[in-house]
Image: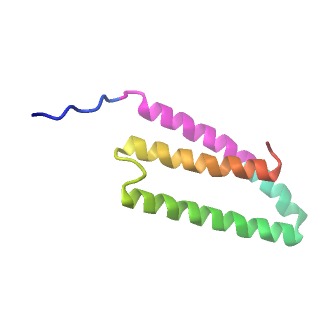
Amino acid sequence: MSRRRAAIDPFAWNKIIFDMWALQLEANTVIALRMARFAGGGAIASRENELMVSEKLNLQWELAMSAWAGTLGKTPESMARAAVRRTRTKVRANRKRLGGA
């Protein structure tokens, strides 16, 4: 009995690249909003800096552990798609929190 192979989507990487492009646009907005917050200085800027660093480290740890555990995806395409999706979720939440909704 032979196993059937899953159909290969020839446009899978194109879709991932488009999602990465959209992530970049959202991230640029968050960067601009954070720069404005940093320019104000004080405790708010300090807290934002701590939050930014901890969020990045936590997300990278989460993605690495998910990849290691095999819960991020089974193929390179599904892993990339899941990583971009999770990152976009975090970036979108930051954009809303910083006032760039």
In the image, what residue occupies the spot 79% across and 42% down? 101
Residue sitting nearer the eye, 31 or 88: 88
Main secondary structure along the magenta-highlighted residues: helix
Classify 49 as above or below 82.
below
Residue 97 percent coordinates (x, y) = 78, 52
Residue 15 percent coordinates (x, y) = 49, 32
- Looking at the image, residue 53 sits to the left or right of residue 8; the answer is right
Please identify the quadrant where the N terminus is shown: top left
- Most extreme residue toward the left is 1
In the image, what residue occupies the spot 39% across and 47% down? 73
- Most extreme residue toward the front is 1
Residue 34, located in which quarter of the rendered image? bottom right
Magenta stretch: give its range. Answer: 9-29
- Looking at the image, residue 29 sits to the left or right of residue 74; the answer is right
Residue sitting nearer the eye, 40 or 4: 4
Q: Is 27 in the magenta?
A: yes
Residue 8 percent coordinates (x, y) = 32, 30
Residue 66, located in which quarter of the rendered image? bottom left
In the image, what residue occupies the spot 38% across and 61% down? 68
- Looking at the image, residue 13 sits to the left or right of residue 96; the answer is left
Q: Is 72 in the magenta?
A: no
Residue 7 percent coordinates (x, y) = 30, 28
